[in-house]
Amino acid sequence: MTIDETVTEPATTPFTLTREHILMVSDLSWSDDNSRALPWYSQDYKCYLPGRPVLNGGQEFLDTLNLVKAAKPDVDIEWHDILVDGNKAVLHVTFRGHHLGPLFGIPPTRRLLEIGEIIIETYDDRGRMVEFRQEGDYAGMLTQMGIVPPPGTGPLGTIAHSVRTAVRLAALDRAHRRVHGG
């Protein structure tokens, strides 16, 4: 089923969670007009992301995806596993994309970022997502950005990395503001 062939509202008949349904909700959520995904999020939807406040409602989650897409416009999702049990699914995915815009306060590094994640999604009996829990290798992503020193860096190397990173991020931020205003 393509995005254009999807139904705009959840069905009123009994629902069975499938891999296809999960992919359809993901495709709609990551699409340029992800407002079409909103009917697939329940009114009491909750999203739990590591180190961030709980997101309440599908719109807040979709807005967060828009921020990620703006920061990594070429983001690609590689699906490794989708395990379904009743109305719950466990997903193993890898996200890849170039860091070309600000991402949660970090100026664009122009580096290719890759992050593996485990996601647990729960759906209601109409096929709407009610809960999203995500765990990922964010320390690894910060290392790829150059924010965190590589593993095995000693104390002096860590200090040197911190100074270089502060100077580099300030320069990246100035360059981004010069090009995009701000």
Image: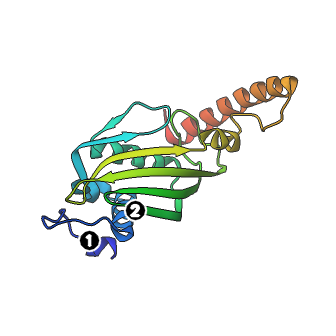
Q: Residue at x 17, y 63 (%)?
A: 9
Residue 103 position, x and y percent, is 52, 40
Q: Is 17 displayed left or right of 179 in the figure?
A: left
Residue 16 position, x and y percent, is 27, 66
Q: Nearer the viewer, mark 2 or mark 1?
A: 2
Q: Is residue 31 visible?
A: no
Separation (CA) of disc 2 from disc 1: 21 Å
Residue 168 position, x and y percent, is 71, 33
Camera-nearest residue between 121 and 166: 121
Quadrant in which residue 10 is drawn: bottom left
**Which three-letter amino acid code belongs to the residue tagged 2?**
Val
Element carrying mark 1:
loop
Q: Is residue 62 above or below residue 19?
A: above
The local crowd at label 1, few if under 14, some if 14 to 19, many if 20 or more residues have their Cα within 10 Å, is: some
- Number of labels in the image equals 2
Q: Residue at x 47, y 57 (%)?
A: 91
Return the residue at label 1: 6
Q: Residue at x 69, y 44 (%)?
A: 144
Q: Residue furthest left?
A: 12
Residue 136 position, x and y percent, is 56, 45
**Which three-letter amino acid code belongs to the residue tagged 1?**
Thr
Q: Is residue 48 visible?
A: yes
Point out the tag, 2 or 1, that comes first from the N-terminus: 1
Quadrant in which residue 139 is drawn: top right
Q: Are marks 2 and 1 in contact (CB under 8 Å)?
A: no
Return the residue at label 2: 84
